[in-house]
Image (spheres, rainbow, N blue to C red):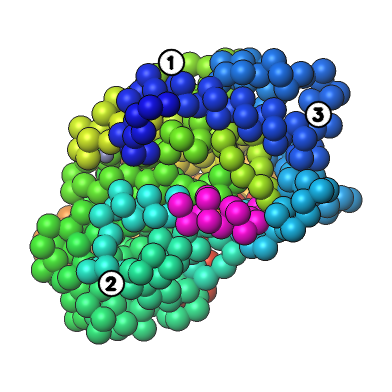
């Protein structure tokens, strides 16, 4: 190549050329030689690495990898090690030194390893790009309120700040430091950027308001680890506005541990700008989840991810289980001007579609993702939690869907009965189900039930039904 482009300004037709070269090199020189699992799989399936010379070849020939392929099994905790690259002639270079893991509450945690090379060429490089997209500079004071854990979120927030010369206060979240002390610290250090899980960021802002520690310097709220639909964004902006923060913006990350990096939105006040990917580091495409066939730009489907580099834990052609309504856009971002593939902001996790037997007749597939847009959209709803349980706790009984809410009360707001009725109608209209009961609780009780000060991530949706 005679011309070199900055990573976020590569013309789309050039990206294809670069990606073809990258995937070819990675599969032929690294994956087929040093990846224990894929090396074996390619032999078994008779896949000749020299047949993979482009992204199209790769998509056509390379099998999908699923979450369950990488996860440890009860009788074999060593499965994830089969996904850690190893060059026997070069052991030191492939030595794993840093680990993050998935956060599943039910399944065993799956570890994802970084080598020294990955720390430099994946984690530090990608987090520098995050800071760049977010416009974070040494003028900022970044309050990292992600839970302290071996999770991508906390460490990405660390690596995008402190090692890059940017002030970062890594609080560890409510469970480690307590929300009031996080607020006090953010206030005393004149924090300008708040980083947290969406639900927890609202809790921090609410705590700041209640204790009159007005966080009026916050210019950006950056979230990860959960969906951030519009009503949530509006709530965040409203609270910041009430505290006197001038023109704050919002950005969300789409982090999934398996990538060991995360695309982020360019910050905006009102628009959900979509997750900006790194075309020289990763390949994203969308498939019809039933047929596995690739779909076109901006068409809905399941996201599939592949890296172009890496040591440590590497997954290829990986089915995320995440469904994106608006697909992937291949056009210059109208907000920041970057020419990178952009994943639409509205992603729902397939794991939150649950089969419920709410009636005696049959099970219904219910998309609990909908609650994230319905509940925060009602101005009176301050907090909420969904609880699934069995009728009379009988394991063979019917399923029950309980909606718990804490409501704002003042002359400004409608009366409780009206709000509940309205909420019930919204749920019926959007989800075509009727909740068993809508409960009204105090904010304090609900905050405790959500585990804002005790859990790594709030218990927004609780499935208390026994596993059969
Ligand atoms: Zn943008």
Secondary structure beneath disc 2?
strand
Q: Nearer the viewer, residue 255 or 341?
A: 341
On screen, residue 239 above or below 417: below
Q: How many numbered marks have been drawn onto this rendered protein structure?
A: 3
Q: Residues within 10 Å of mark 3 (few under 14, many from 20)?
A: some
Is 200 situated left or right of 50 in this image? left
Find out whether the residues at labels 2 and 1 contact each other: C-beta distance under 8 Å. no
Q: Using the image as rendered, state which of residue 360 and residue 26 is in the foreground.
A: 26
Query: Which residue is denoted by mark 2 in the rendering?
Result: 141
Cα separation, mark 3 vs mark 1, equals: 28 Å
Q: Which residues are magenta?
A: 111-125
What residue did someone put label 3 on? 41
In the rendered structure, find residue 296 and report the number of the disc placed on it.
Answer: 1
From the Cβ of disc 1, is ligand 1 less than 8 Å away? no
**Depth check: 220 or 20 in front?**
20
Residue 55 image offset from top left, x and y in percent: 55, 21
Left or right: 335 as drawn, with respect to 395: left
* Circle 3: element type: helix
Which quarter of the picture shows residue 439? Answer: bottom left
């Amino acid at each position: 190549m005679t011309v070199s482009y900055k990573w976020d300004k590569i013309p789309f037709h050039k990206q294809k050329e670069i990606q073809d070269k990258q995937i070819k090199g990675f599969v032929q020189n690294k994956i087929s030689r040093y990846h224990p699992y894929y090396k074996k799989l390619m032999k078994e399936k008779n896949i000749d690495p020299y047949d993979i010379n482009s992204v199209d070849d790769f998509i056509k020939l390379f099998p999908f990898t699923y979450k369950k392929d990488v996860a440890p099994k009860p009788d074999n905790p060593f499965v994830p090690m089969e996904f850690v690259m190893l060059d026997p002639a070069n052991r030191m270079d492939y030595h794993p030194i840093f680990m993050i893991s998935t956060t599943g509450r039910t399944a065993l945690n799956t570890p994802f390893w970084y080598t020294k090379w990955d720390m430099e060429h994946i984690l530090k490089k990608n987090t520098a790009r995050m800071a760049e997209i977010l416009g974070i500079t040494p003028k900022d004071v970044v309050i990292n309120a992600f839970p302290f854990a071996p999770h991508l979120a906390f460490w990405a927030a660390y690596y995008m700040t402190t090692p890059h010369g940017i002030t970062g206060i890594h609080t560890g979240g409510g469970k480690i430091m307590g929300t009031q002390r996080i607020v006090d610290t953010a206030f005393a250090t004149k924090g300008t950027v708040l980083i947290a899980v969406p639900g927890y960021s609202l809790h921090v802002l609410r705590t700041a308001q209640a204790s009159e520690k007005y966080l009026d310097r916050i210019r950006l709220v950056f979230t990860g680890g959960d969906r951030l639909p519009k009503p949530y964004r509006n709530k965040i902006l409203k609270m910041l506005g009430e505290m006197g923060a001038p023109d704050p913006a919002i950005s969300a990350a789409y982090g999934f541990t398996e990538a060991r990096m995360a695309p982020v939105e360019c910050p905006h006040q009102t628009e959900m700008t979509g997750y900006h990917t790194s075309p020289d580091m990763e390949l994203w495409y969308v498939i019809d989840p039933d047929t596995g066939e690739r779909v076109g730009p901006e068409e809905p489907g399941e996201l599939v991810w592949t890296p172009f580099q890496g040591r440590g834990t590497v997954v290829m052609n990986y089915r995320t289980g995440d469904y994106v309504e608006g697909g992937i856009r291949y056009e210059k971002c109208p907000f920041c001007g970057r020419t990178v593939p952009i994943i639409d902001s509205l992603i729902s996790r397939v794991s939150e579609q649950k089969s419920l037997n709410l009636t005696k007749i049959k099970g219904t597939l219910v998309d609990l993702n909908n609650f994230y847009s319905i509940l925060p959209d009602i101005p009176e709803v301050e907090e909420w939690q969904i609880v699934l349980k069995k009728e009379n706790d009988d394991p063979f009984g019917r399923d029950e869907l309980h909606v718990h809410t804490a409501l704002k009360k003042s002359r400004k707001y409608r009366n409780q009965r009206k709000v509940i009725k309205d909420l019930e109608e919204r749920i019926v209209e959007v989800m075509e189900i009727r909740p068993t009961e809508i409960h009204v609780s105090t904010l304090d009780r609900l905050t405790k039930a959500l585990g804002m000060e005790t859990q790594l991530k709030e218990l927004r949706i609780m499935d208390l039904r026994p596993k059969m």
